[in-house]
Every structure is written in structure tokens, then in C-alpha cells.
Image: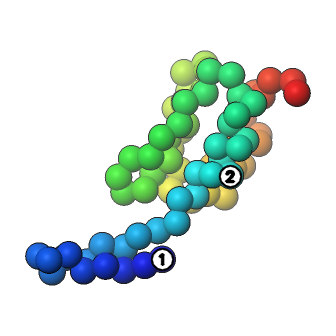
Amino acid sequence: MKSVTTPDGDQIRLLPDFTQAVRGLLRNCEGVRYGLKYPAILMITTSGGHEASFSHPKLAKEFVLNKVVRKAS
């Protein structure tokens, strides 16, 4: 994590992108969308229209592994 001060004096924290691992898991999932919303919330929408949000990568990974149907490799 890196902290930066803007010219206005505001503090901004830059956090690592935790979606890379999730993206890898989702490549084999047909019809699934994902994205980030401020403040750093990962949204996953399944092909069935179920929308879930995560602020921690471990919970997102568990959701994908346990709840999302993946295509056969």
C-alpha cells in the first residue's frame, strides 16, 4: 500500500489490484461480468443475474470457487 498526498492536502491510499487472481478464475465462466466500484468493491454478476459484492479478495475467490458454474475445460 502506498500513501500519496494530493496538492489539496488530501491523503490517497493506493492499494494493490486484487482482481488478477479472480479474473483468472472467471475466464472459464461463461456469461459472468465483474468490475470494481469505489471504494474498492469487486462486483461479480453471474450468468443467472445474481450480483454479489466483495471488499476482500479471499471472499471473492471463495464465491467464485463455490457458487459460480464454470465451463468444462
* Disc 1: CA contacts within 10 A as few (<14), some (14-19) or many (>=20): few
Relative depth, front residue between 16 and 40: 16
Residue at screen point 53% across, 37% down: 34
Q: Is residue 18 above or below residue 60?
A: below
Q: In this rendering, does residue 59 appear at all?
A: no
Residue at screen point 37% across, 73% down: 13
User: Where does residue 65 sit, x and y in percent of width and height?
Assistant: 76, 42
Residue projecting furthest to the right: 73
Real-space CA distance between mark 2 and mark 1, rounded to the nearest whole angstrom: 18 Å
Residue 1 as seen in the image, left or right of residue 18: left
Task: Inspect the image, locate mark 2, and give the three-letter code of the amino acid beneath it.
Answer: Ala
Task: Inspect the image, locate mark 1, and give the three-letter code of the amino acid beneath it.
Answer: Met
Residue projecting furthest to the left: 8
Q: Which residue is mark 2?
A: 21
Residue 68 as seen in the image, left or right of residue 18: right
Relative depth, front residue between 4 and 35: 4
Q: In this rendering, does residue 34 appear at all?
A: yes
Q: Is residue 40 above or below residue 66?
A: below
Q: Which labelled disc corresponds to residue 1?
A: 1
Residue at screen point 31% across, 79% down: 4
User: Where does residue 12 sit, x and y in percent of width and height?
Assistant: 30, 73
